[in-house]
Every structure is written in C-alpha cells, then in structure tokens.
Amino acid sequence: MTSVARDGNARLLTVPTVLLLLGFILLLFAESLVTLVNQWWDSEEYGHGLFMPFIGAYILWSKRDEISRLPMRSASSGIVFSFIGLSLYVAAVLADLESVKHYSFIIVLAGYVLFVGGWKLFKIALVPLALLLLVIPLPYLLISSLTAGLQLISSELGTWMIRAMGIPVFLEGNIIDMGAYKLQVVEACSGLRYLYPLASIALIVAYFLRSPLWFKALLILSTVPVTIVMNSLRIAVTGLLVNNFGVAAAEGFLHDFEGWAVFMAAFLLLLVEVWLYKLLFSSANSFFDLFDFGDADDSKASNDIRFLIPTIMIVSFVIPVFLFGGLANYFAFNEQTVIPLREKFDSFPMRIGGRNVNLSYLEQDVLDILKADDYFLGSYRDSKADDEVNLYMVYYQQQKDGSALHSPKVCIPGGGWKVTDEDVVEFNYRATGETKAANRVVIRKGEYTQLVYYWIEQKGISYTDEYVARASLISSAVFDKRSDGSLVRVNVLVKDNDFEKADLKLQSFIRDMAVYLPSFLPR
C-alpha cells in the first residue's frame, strides 16, 4: 500500500501519512509539551492531566468503527485554526507565556483534525480535545483572580458552617479568628484543586452517559457549586477539629486526608446526581445501564482508511506548520533575554518630601507566592505620627506564568478590605507638565477608609490595565528582548471622609518620588 495516491486535484493520504504529520506537530511542540507534563507531575491541581491523553485516546479507539466509515474530506477551516494556533505559539515563545503555548497546541491540534477529516471527525474528537483543554494550567492573571474569589466565598461559607456548629468565630478577609487559634484560608484551600479534576471527571461521565444534552451540561456545571460547598465543608470540619484538638489538626497527614475525603465526597455527589436522573427521567434497568462505553464492532470497521485532501490545502497546511513551528523553536532555543541594569530597592531613598520611612517586610509564605525579584514596603511619615503614606513596589526582571504582576484588587479583599469605588485618575506628574494615569481605588474595613493609587510600570510606560500591560510584553520581547516590569502602589488613610485632601496627599508624594523611580524601574 502506498502512503499517498492521486485523485485529480486532491490526494488520498493513508493513515501512516496522517500519523506522520501528527508526529511532526508533536515534535514542533515538544519543548512546550515537556513543560506541560512536568507541570502535571508536580501539580496537585493538574496531576490528573497525566491520564487525560490516554482517556482521550480510548474514546477515539472506542469510535474506531464509526471513524473508519466517515467520508474523510478536509475542511479549509483546519488551515485557519492551525494558522491562528501557530501564530499564537510564536508570540507565546517570544513572550515566554507557557499557558498560551499550551493553548496554541490545542488550537493547532483542532486544526489538524479538521484538516485531515473535516467537521464530522472533529465532532468525534471534540471531547478528547476538551479533556486536554481542561488540564492546561490557566494563565496566571486569571488563576489569581479565580483563586482570590473562591478563597473569599469558601471562607464566608465555611465560617457560617462553623457558627452553625455553635463555635463563635470572626471572619476578616481570608482569616478565620477562633479566639485561641486563627485559620488562614490560603490559595491551596481555595477549592481549585478540587474543581479541575472534578470538572474533567464530570465531562468523562457525561460523555459516556445515556442522557439528553441538558443533563450532561447540568452535570458538568454542577461541579462549581459542589466544589464550593464541599471545600467550605472542609474548612468548617478543620475549624471543628482545631477547636477541639488544637492547631495540629489543621496540618500534616490529617489535613491532607481531609482533602482526599472531601474530594471523594464531591465525586459521590456527582454520582448521586446521575442516580437521581435514573430515578426521575430514565427507564434504564440498572445504574450501569445508563452508561455506553462504546464497544466498537471491528467487523464493521474498514482497514483501508484514506483521507481525501486537495493538494492546495496540503501545501497551505504543511508550509505554515514547518515555517511557524521552526521559527518558534528557533526562538525557544536561542532565547536572549535582556535583564536591564537597575538599582535595588535596598537603596531607595529613606526620606521623600519631608517624610521618613519605616520599613516593613513580607513573610516568606507571601514571597513564595509573589516570586518577585525585588520589592519595597514602607510607610513614609512626617512629624505627625498619624499622617503617613504607604508605598509598595514589586519588581520582576522576567515576567512568566506563575511570576507576574497582578492587580492589588485581587489581594485587597483577602485582608478584610472591601472595594467600594474604583476608577482611573490622571494628574500632573512632573514639573514639565507630564501627566500620570493611575488606578484610584477606595477600600473600607469597619470604620477605616483608605485611598489607593496603583499602576504597572514597564519600560517607563505606565499601564492601568494589567491585561494590556501583559499583551505589551509580546512586542517588548520581540523588539527589546525584555519582559521586566513592576507594580507601584501608594495608599493613605482617609480622615473625616476628606477624599480631596487624600488625593492631593498621594499625588504630591508621587510627584516627589518620581525623580527617583527611573533608577529603580528601568526605562
């Protein structure tokens, strides 16, 4: 059997040829895929990703008789998908955005399926592709926002459950104060490590389940409230154990065992949903009759599958794959990131605008999350002890997934503060008349109100939108081979509800320190 046969202006490609092309695509993405597998191996949230390619392959294998009978005709949209995916891959390599590299692989893989078999083959491969999509780590900006939101919801619901048990507690942000003990709902306790595997399991169950589409969708979507409730229950149980047996109950083996027990309970809740569907809507004789694991009939399968693809489409697909894939790998293996020279924050002025600084330091667990290269945290006070301006700056010499700037609005609620107002303000920044744009946020906690200004500084350019700042890294990486950046945040206590005075105080302080910033935040 020859691997390629002509058919007018089209070619009939056999299975070995099509698989060879797939192997070449995998080879082009090898560097990214190795990183992804390492992330699965090291991550508690995405560890189940190691099994998803095999489950996806089983799903395709179970449909082999149906696939063999399909009219394998290429869809031109496959070329579009692949072109978009490959372009994203090149950009992601230049900006060193691992999550975007992985997403571009899924897009190219989807394009490959459309290219070789059209929309009918794509429909069969949709669930395996979705399973791979679910185990790709989310971009850092998105995951930090989701984590912070889930932390707050789980903390509030967990506190309500603890109170329902008759234990008096006080909640301040993500910290549950039980009097003698304090429980901090950290990022690892946000519930995401339950949500990711539970969503994948729900998708697999829904795929094999004999049920209408509405119930499949309901089953998958229910993983969000199930995760939140069960994670909150875990926090409540931890609080109960700590209250009775001390803080050791929230650490070590017992804490990890609670996590596994809660996850299994969440999985059982999904099965209970399926069981209720059987009772109310299905006529299946048994619970297992609800599932169709798709045993293929090999007697109906064709042993000579051929893919009819126009010659022009083969050329239009293969050339970009070689060109963009080769370009991305060239950049990946010849990376020359420029780390600009700068002064460290250790030498930042101790006196600005007649105010002397009182330095503070972040705890190690916070530094482990930030993964910053340098930071400054201090309060500048004048002769009046109660009149101070707080300054926080953090610097990254290379911004990557997992070590990148994100909005303070993500972190502020964790300390018990509530954002009550936010907008963008512009003010005179220098004597030359240059203006500065900054995010202006009003936060409150109890009887205290603070006014916060913050912005992202990259190459001397200020950004008020973190996503625009992140996107600008691509052009910076291409033309300047830089991805450094910093966040600057200043805040002041608002007294007597006098926001005008607070605004003037912050703007005056920012103008006074502007002369020093270029030495510490490279242009």
Image: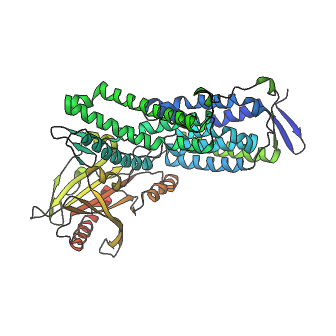
The quadrant the C terminus occupies is: bottom left
Q: In which quarter of the image is residue 226?
A: top left
The residue depicted at 18 percent of the width and 57 percent of the height is 379
Q: Where is residue 229 in the image (x, y as percent from the top left)?
A: 38, 41
Q: In which quarter of the image is residue 67?
A: top right
Q: Position of residue 187 (x, y in %)?
A: 35, 41
Q: Answer left or right for 86 relative to 340.
A: right
Rendered view: 425 above or below 111: below
Q: Which colour scheme is used?
A: rainbow
Q: Is residue 440 visible?
A: no
Query: Among all residues in the image, which is located at the extreme right?
Result: 8
Q: Position of residue 488 (x, y in %)?
A: 31, 58
Q: Where is residue 299 in the image (x, y as percent from the top left)?
A: 80, 23
Q: Who is closer to the viewer here, 461 or 309?
A: 309
The residue depicted at 34 percent of the width and 56 percent of the height is 409
Q: Can residue 195 be seen in this view?
A: yes
Q: Answer left or right for 116 relative to 238.
A: right
Rendered view: 133 above or below 461: above
How many marks the image carries: the answer is 0
The quadrant the N terminus occupies is: top right
The residue depicted at 44 percent of the width and 58 percent of the height is 469
